[in-house]
Amino acid sequence: RSQRRQTMSVILTTRVLADDTCFMFNAERVKDNHERLKRFERRFRIQFRMWDLVNALFDQETLKLRGGDERDLSLLVGASLGKALKTFAGVHELCLMGWGEDALILLRSNVNLLINLGYILGDSEPAERGNDFIAFSYLERMRYLKAAHADKKQPWKSLMSDDELKMRAERWRAVGIKGRAERVPGFHYTNGYALYSSFEHSDAMALNTYIAEWNELGPRIHAGPSDDHIAAALWHNAMVLADVLYFFCGHFGIKRPDIFDSIKKLLNSIKE
């Protein structure tokens, strides 16, 4: 008995044009971005408002680095907010373009940042935990450089001794991401990081979402923009930035209950 052979078709969003026009630009896709903004208008407006509130805070506050043993910690906290803001904007742009899964992958890095920040600043000795993180990060970067660029001279030399670096890195490594996440609201890990890791690692469950439909001819693989995961990404994006800002202000002694009251009302409006 003969069997009908199944085939696979791939749905692409763009095509390579014969006149060498940039295939990444597509007028219909830009139009769809505007429509997506309308479909998720409330959640996009929350992103805009969050950005305005952060700017308002920094327009009115002066930051001073802590001295002594906490100087490096202050630099770490300051850089963390800078990274969080950049990633916040990146997640927003990806959502606007319909790349919800990719937005969650990027958002995962901000959740990771928040978990590390909360673990460090929530400790009774935050400067010690900050130095553990620095030592761990330094050794990881050195390991990469030795593997990928063995013929080049190492660009940095830590002020910590080799023994201290090893001790601190092992102490940081001993507490996994799940353990460090205990010092931030639980949903960031259980509802966010754990799921986003599936997408980040492109596991089988994540890849399954690319099978748009299956009929007698075989599967169709979807590789274009969609509204999938947009609502969740925009909601969590705002929540993560709010909590990073909370830790940042706590470290630098910034007391702005008016800003955080506005943020709380803004985030609660998502649930309405």
Image: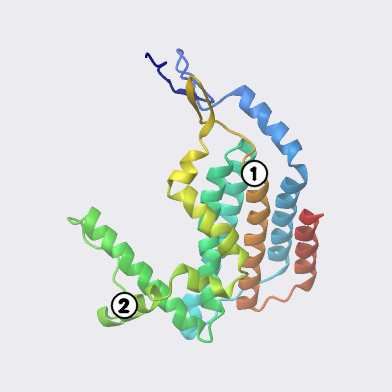
- Which quadrant, please, contains the C terminus? bottom right
At 37% across and 79% down in the image, what residue appears?
A: 171
At 71% across and 32% down in the image, what residue appears?
A: 34
- Which quadrant, please, contains the N terminus? top left
Q: Which residue is mark 1?
A: 230
Does residue 11 lie above or below 66 as drawn?
above
Q: Amino acid at mark 1?
A: Ile
Does residue 197 lie above or below 178 as drawn?
above
Label 1: element kind: helix
* Mark 2 Cα shell of 10 Å, populated few (<14), some (14-19), many (≥20): many
Mark 1–mark 2 distance (CA, rounded to whole Å):
41 Å
Q: Pointers 1 and 2 in contact (CB under 8 A)?
A: no
Label 2: element kind: helix
Would residue 256 appear left or right of 141 to someone viewing this image? Answer: right
Q: Amino acid at mark 2?
A: Leu
Q: Nearer the viewer, mark 1 or mark 2?
A: 1
Camera-side residue of 230 and 163: 230
Percent x, y for residue 165?
Answer: 31, 77
At 59% across and 71% down in the image, what residue appears?
A: 184
Q: Is residue 75 visible?
A: no
Camera-side residue of 220 and 144: 220
Q: Which residue is mark 2?
A: 165
Furthest toward the front, the residue is 1
Q: Is residue 157 visible?
A: yes
